[in-house]
Image (cartoon, helix red, strand yellow):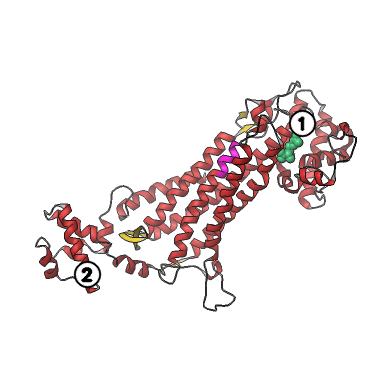
Amino acid sequence: MKLWGGRFTKETNELVHNFNASIGFDRKFYHQDIRGSIAHVTMLAKQGIIRDEEKDKIIAGLQSIEEDITSGTLPITAEHEDIHSFVEANLIERIGDAGKKLHTGRSRNDQVALDMKLYVRDEVSEMKGILLNLMNTLQALMEEHTDTYMPGFTHLQKAQPVTLAHHIGAYMEMFKRDYTRLCDIYERMNYCPLGAGALAGTTYPLDRDCTAQLLDFYAPTLNSMDSVSDRDYLLELLSAMSIMMMHLSRFCEEIIIWNSNEYRFIELDDAYSTGSSIMPQKKNPDIAELIRGKSGRVYGALTSLLTTMKGIPLAYNKDMQEDKELSFDAIDTVKGCLTLFDGMISTAAFRKKEMERSAAGGFTNATDAADYLVKNGVPFRDAHGIIGQLVLLCIDKNCALDDLTLDEFKAVCPAFEADIYDAISLSTCVTRRNTIGAPGQEAMKRVLDANKKQLAEWAK
Ligand code: ARG
């Protein structure tokens, strides 16, 4: 029997029922649905709309339903259209007539708007925790690797030397922005739609401030039509998650490159790698590849919901039911990816020697060699040309700038002195770069201190 069966003379076509039903996925927020209902009846009783005994009975009934669903003794069955109908029908079955008053002054439109917000709010909090764990892992790696030299790249060509701390630090900044995006979403979404009714409020003297407070919202939403049809917070979340996945995907791409036989900058742990069914030697970075791949799925959810929402007239329309599966999937995907990435990076072995060897080759100190000449009075443009010539010489001799003799240096430009070797050593190149945000250890220490404070603040 449908909640709305009164006006109908026929049973719903079975295909229609299945097409229309959302119970297959909105069962995910039964906790939130029941929490919202408890707040609603608490307010109804306070306002004298239902009696206290009725409220108590309803709440006890709802709590027993919640316990039974959780313990598995009450299976959520598909003959009901959605989780709201399922809970209400069960309540009436358990407590009789009082249960029929649960839906007074409420519509499934404001109910589902509330449930989804409650669910997303919980998920955003959980996601923030997982992201914070990952940032703590990265912070520890940064602290450990302020002296681990590696090449910095542009165009995937060796450019200038940096440290592993600095490279990881770039991702740290991205994840810090991701974290603040999640905070922003929470701030903007934390207003309660319950009491908006189907679209136009209600004539019952509902106390919307009261339900908003009971459910830990800042305040009620201010327009009942917007309340039941706003999905901006989901779009914001999907957008923030898409950006987060893009960051994870870029990092994964680097890990895949670093883990390759050619680079060998890192070695992924056996527990985070997989093998080949045919090639016995293989150890593949499947987890990094999967995270990179799953970014497509999260972007897809964002595009999908934007498209669904774009032509919907006010107020609620059933199109909006499409917000659920894709949001649930995207949220679960992002939480999973963050957790697995954390495990993968925290168990990986970083091969300092390989990184350093790579940083020492490829003329990553060429800019510093030019700067050396500038300090000795050569204009930069001339210095650039001189070092370019020396690089050509080195390519010819298959050696690094540091391997040239002082005579070879001087033959190209007399401004070179014996201190050139120290000026272009790997450690000098990095250690002297101490402008804000640069890889030098002094600059890095300031960043690490600031991060530490920020992470502790967020952990509160
Ligand atoms: N399952 C619906 C959804 O997810 C709940 C709201 C139903 N409202 C309605 N008027 N049919 O959007």
Is 367 situated left or right of 135 in this image? left
Q: Quadrant of residue 210?
A: top right
User: What's the residue at 88%, 34% (across, down)?
Assistant: 8
Q: Nearer the viewer, residue 140 or 84?
A: 84
**Label 2, on which residue?**
394
- The kind of residue on which mark 1 rests is Val
**Residue 223: within the magenta?**
no
Up the image or down, 285 lies above or below 93; here it is below
Query: Magenta residues: mostly which secondary structure?
Result: helix
User: Of callouts 1 and 2, which one flags the residue occurring earlier in the amino acid sequence?
Assistant: 1
Dot label at residue 268: none
User: What's the residue at 39%, 46% (across, down)?
Assistant: 450
- The kind of residue on which mark 2 rests is Cys
Find the magenta span and give its range: 231-238
Q: CA distance from mark 1 to mark 2?
A: 81 Å
Q: Quadrant of residue 144?
A: bottom left
Is 56 situated left or right of 135 in this image? right
